[in-house]
Amino acid sequence: MNVHDEIETLTDVYLAGGLEADDRRGVEEHAAGCEQCAAILRDAREFHGWMRGASASNAPPANLEERIIERLHEASPKARRFPGAPRIIRILGGLAAVFALVVLGGAFTGSTMLSVKHSAGLSSAPGSEDFGDVAFREYARKSGKDSGAEGYVQNQEGARYGGRMGGEARKNLDELKSRSKDLSDSRGRPMTGAPASPAPMEAEKKYAESMDKAERGEESLGMADAEGKPGDPGNPYIDDRKIIRNADLHIEVEKYEDSYAKVTQIAVAEKGFVAGANTTRLANGKMRADVTLRIPPERFESVLTQLKALGTLRNQAITSQDITKQYLDLGTRQKSKEALVERLKKALLEGKGNVKEIMEAEVALGKATEELESIKGELKYYDNLIGLSTITLHLFEKDLGLPFEYVLTLQSTIGVTGSDADGVYAKAQELIRAAGGQVADARMTRQNDGSSSGFVRGKVDAEKFPAVREDLKKLGHVDQDTVNQQQTGRGGQGPVKPDAPVRKEQAIVDFTVNTPAMVVTRRAVIAIEADPAEAAYQESRRDVESAGGKILEGSLTGRTEGASATVTAQVDADKFAALVEKFKSRGKVKNATVKQDEPGGGADRAPLIRERGEISLAIATPARLLTEEHGVMKTIRETFANSIAGVLWSVEKLIVGIALAGPWILLLGVIWVLWKRRRRARTA
Amino acid sequence: MDPEREWVLRSQKGDRGAFEEIVRATARLVWAYVHGLVKDPSWTEDLVQETYLKAWESIGTLKEADAFRGWLFTIARRLAWRHDEIAGRSTAVAEVPEKAAAAAESEDAGEHIRAALARLPERYRLPVTLHFVNGLEYGEISKSLGLANGSLRGLIARGTKKLRDDLAPWWRNRNERA
């Protein structure tokens, strides 16, 4: 194996940083003098660069571990319950606990809870919940993942920061440590052979140093301290944690202007400022405003106290958000990006490599710079948030909720009865429109019995209402006329001030017109004789139609002689008499009766009721041959007719008798003739 | 490996902090392992998380603390296989032809590299993945795999060579394509 082959074999390890210093130098020196090997090396370097670049999208996320741990957290917020015990023992333990519960629960009721708990605790000894809790607390305390603003972790803050750094910060230092190693000059990568290499030791030392710094309270990560001096015992918010504090206050004040002036004074006095104010004047003249204040965190509490003195505190919410982790992450990222930018700049200045490499370096530099700027911006944003707490103040003036005026509403219902529902219905709408009102609703319904009703809802100005009301009442006989007047307070709840203005709203008019069903008050029964009956029947039907009446029933029986017909018709009362006369003229009146019913209801209703008359006409054909006869002639004629009928009857019976006896006579005759011939022959 | 043994023992007693240390020490390794194993790499992180969940649940059943890594890898491998099986079953009919065609035409270098890595023999795959994909330093790879310098050197050298041979045609053409 010659040197070239050896170099080729070592190339990848060399590029992966796996060669010890001697070997590395060997490769570099050889490549410097050997074009062939230099080419191999260049090629391999390119491949490695390309591989790493192209695989970047496949790389695991930077916070892989954190995410796993988070997931563990979510999956089982408490520590494992029975660690270490084989499953069967765990099951037995659980059964024992259940059994103990049942037995004890059955034996004693009431005061057994304690003992139950105790026995359960015993049966699951090392993995009991208590133990799990302790373990979890230990875990939480170590990991420091919990936001400082919640739970007992916060309670322990004092103790935690008393002597040592929190887990959170330590974790970030760990990260910083590994990053700083990352960032060490690429050519000077630690070429470690064994796990116990000098590099980790160095990192360890760095770590210890930063720990020391942190303990001394110095800003180990080189970030601006916006929160005042560390270790100030008077302020609980000052340590190396980054906490954003916000408050939201709802305060009821006497007068907005005065309060706003005071708010401004407080803000200025406490080295803060009013960041924004949004004022609204409500319809009742009261003010409501949202004011945003930015206050240095150390003055937060004092400002809150002062603000609360402005008026009555209705609601308050104070929130805090711990962004230590994000902040430290950003810090480390900023550092690493800065280092990267430096390195790239240096590389570009040295101008090593081919055009492509330089181009790539420039692109990378641009990207890195951009990212660095974005990180800086984000840090600045956080600095701003941490540096100044935000208080949102909602001010509203007292009595905001009280009514400020009376509202007068008129609601009127008018009902009339008239014979012409359609006309009244249209007229009512016209009236409302003419008064400048609007018709909100209008419907008309008709029934089979001839009754109908119309409904119109109109809205008119309160001033015009009385006139409209009078006009509507003229449209018919007034059945109903009510006006409801209501005065209510508007703008809130509670009593209305007596001197509050009165506002009249549009009056609502519900107008109804009713037309009652028709009532038959006159009846006529007429019997006539007409020849031909059919013609009279048809004539009388035409009469009904021309009088505007309605034929209820009509029938005609027998088309020729002796035909009869009936017609029953209804007609308006005023046409009744005329129609009766007409019917009478259609033939020879045999019978006619007319009667008039007294209409129901009082006399005042009489003219409104729509009267009708009903006529029943019977038409008969007169007897044609003989007119009616009386006296002797009739008797004679009848007798004569009877005797003829008797003769005819006798003839009829005779013929029947002959027909009956004929054959027998004939038979007897034949027998007699035959007997005679025999006698003659005997004598002869 | 000694601290890891200590962590494992403490984890078995329910010490979550210790288990967390294990996660920090081994997560990237397991990630690389699963990444080279599973068909659809977008599932890698989920599977890794699942692996640790499972490990935490059942670390009590692990008898030999020294065998922890093998045991962890076994969990990961089983999960990955099972996932592939289930995913394969559900996508076999509709998606696979499209997906295969898309992959064949794909110009995505990352996908090509992953495929090449998956083709590597298993003992090379892990160190090479850790180096190229996870971007770990040589020392870190050596530490996390617990391999002596010499053996890792051989694995890296041979693994990278195989990978380069495998990818060479595609890689050489990359400029023309671009």
Image (tube, coloured by chain):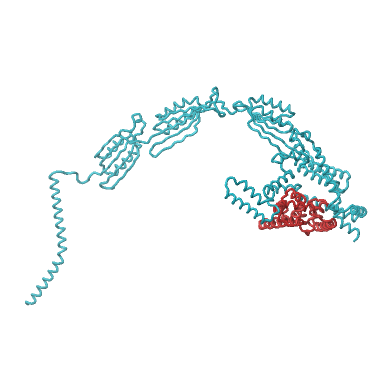
In the rendering, at what x and y percent does residue B11 appear?
Answer: 73, 51
Report the quarter where the C terminus of chain A lies: bottom left
Q: Is residue A67 above or below residue A162?
A: below
The tint chain A carries is cyan
Is residue B13 placed above or below A292 in the rendered structure? below
- Left/right placement of residue A386 relative to residue A419 reads right
In the image, residue A5 sits, relative to residue A550, either above or below, namely: below
Whether residue A223 is visible, yes or no, is yes
Q: Nearer the viewer, residue A517 or A407?
A: A407
When asked about the image quadrant of residue A216, the answer is top right
Give the x, y percent position of residue A481.
Answer: 43, 28
- In this rendered view, identify the residue nearer to me: A157 or B134: A157
Residue A72: image location, x then y, percent: 70, 49
Question: Where A682 falls versus B4 (above or below)?
Answer: below
Q: Is residue B94 visible?
A: no
The residue that appears at 73% across and 31% down in the rendered structure is A299
Residue A527 in the figure: left or right of residue A38? left
The residue that appears at 30% across and 33% down in the rendered structure is A598
The residue furthest right is A33
Percent across and percent down for residue A514 are 41, 33
Q: Quadrant of residue A425?
A: top left
Q: Which image quadrant: the N terminus of chain A?
A: bottom right
Q: Specify the farthest residue to the left.
A: A683
Q: Nearer the viewer, residue A534 or A375?
A: A375
Give the colour of chain B.
Answer: red
Quadrant in the rendering for residue A6: bottom right
| Residue at (55, 28) in percent of width and height | A494
Count numbered badges in the picture: 0
